[in-house]
């Protein structure tokens, strides 16, 4: 019996090591085809600012993503006289080694510094955040409740979906692998981007390699935000996809119900998967952001009822 157990452990570790080497080779192959700027950021994944106006829309991408996720929405908002600032979280869009070194603290610091910068020249700031960016935004708001005028959350990372996780939850599997897979510190996703629009499933601004530390950081944010929705009082718009395979849609709906905001609205993106900013129906996001911004700027009774 002991020898059987030892044999199983040896085979397990050999398999783990083999997978880690496979991923290393895949990363090397991927990097050989990537063009980077002088700062080491992948071409097309850089931060950008477009449009001019007194109202600033701060755009924050999600897990394994980049500012390129806003390439459809930002130009449309810029045409409506909004200043659109799409930021890049530290580590994202950089080499996998640097990506693996990024921290939640650096993400939160980045958001904080960008908000303070925009406050200097803009009368109003609305944060629009997708997926992990939503978790970062929520975490920041919990410590800085009135730092912006409103928030739009697109498929925010409230809880990770278990749709692709057999038997146990995705978080349980992650914890299990952290202890049992010492060599495999980076995983390669076998899935296409969760978009109903087939032309967006190979979205080039997405990275398919997930360092364990970045996943750890994501769960750290999720755990820190749990059960605190009632502390958020400022105006909020929440988009949820009922077919989201990445973020559990029921958790997003429950988060919305528990929000302490009096001025809140839930929008169901029934044509999209997780990739709401670029998927079918993305135009609705633009329309809702415009309407939200105009409502806040007009000083209507509900616009600042919680501030």
Image (spheres, rainbow, N blue to C red):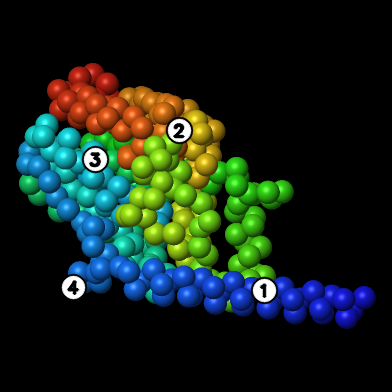
Residue at figure coordinates x 52%, y 42% from the top left = 245
Query: How far is disc 4 from disc 2 in space, using C-alphas?
Result: 37 Å
Measure the C-alpha gap from mark 1 to mark 3.
42 Å
User: Mark 1 = which residue?
Assistant: 15
Closer to the N terminus: mark 3 or mark 4? 4
Whichever of callouts 1 and 2 sits on the residue coming sooner in the sequence is 1
Determine the secondary structure under disc 1: helix
| Quarter the C terminus occupies | top left
Where residue 241 is drawn, which disc sits there? 2
- Picture coordinates of residue 131, whole percent (x, y): 40, 45
Task: Give the residue drawn at x 48%, y 75%.
Answer: 25
Q: Residue 3, image x and y in percent? A: 88, 80
Q: Which residue is mark 4?
A: 38
- Dot 1 alpha-carbon crowd within 10 angstroms: few under 14, some 14 to 19, many 20 or more: some
* Tag of residue 253: none
Give the residue at mark 3.
Answer: 72
Mark toward the start of the polypeptide (4 vs 1): 1
């Amino acid at each position: 019996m002991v020898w059987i157990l030892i044999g199983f452990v040896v085979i397990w570790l050999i398999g783990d090591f083999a997978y880690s080497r496979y991923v290393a080779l895949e990363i090397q192959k991927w990097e050989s085809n990537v063009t980077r700027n002088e700062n080491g950021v992948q071409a097309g994944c850089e931060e950008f600012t477009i449009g001019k106006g007194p109202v600033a829309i701060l755009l924050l991408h999600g897990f394994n993503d980049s500012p390129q996720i806003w390439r459809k929405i930002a130009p449309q908002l810029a045409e409506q006289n909004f200043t659109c600032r799409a930021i890049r979280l530290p580590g994202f869009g950089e080499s996998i080694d640097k990506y693996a070194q990024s921290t939640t603290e650096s993400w939160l610091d980045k958001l904080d510094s960008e908000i303070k910068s925009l406050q200097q020249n803009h009368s109003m700031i609305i944060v629009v955040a997708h997926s992990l960016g939503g978790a970062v935004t929520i975490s920041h708001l919990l410590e800085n409740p009135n730092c912006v005028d409103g928030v739009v959350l697109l498929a925010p990372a409230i809880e990770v979906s278990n749709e692709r996780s057999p038997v146990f939850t995705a978080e349980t599997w992650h914890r299990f692998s952290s202890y049992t897979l010492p060599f495999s510190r980076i995983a390669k996703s076998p899935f296409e981007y969760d978009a109903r629009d087939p032309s967006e499933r190979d979205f080039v601004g997405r990275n398919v390699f997930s360092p364990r530390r970045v996943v750890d950081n994501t769960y750290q944010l999720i755990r820190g935000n749990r059960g605190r929705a009632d502390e958020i009082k400022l105006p909020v718009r929440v988009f949820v996809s009922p077919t989201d395979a990445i973020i559990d849609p029921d958790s997003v709906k429950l988060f919305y119900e528990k929000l302490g905001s009096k001025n809140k609205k839930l929008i169901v993106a029934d044509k999209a998967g997780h990739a709401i900013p670029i998927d079918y129906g993305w135009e609705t996001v633009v329309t809702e952001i415009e309407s939200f911004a105009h409502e806040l700027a007009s000083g209507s009774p509900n616009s600042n009822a919680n501030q």
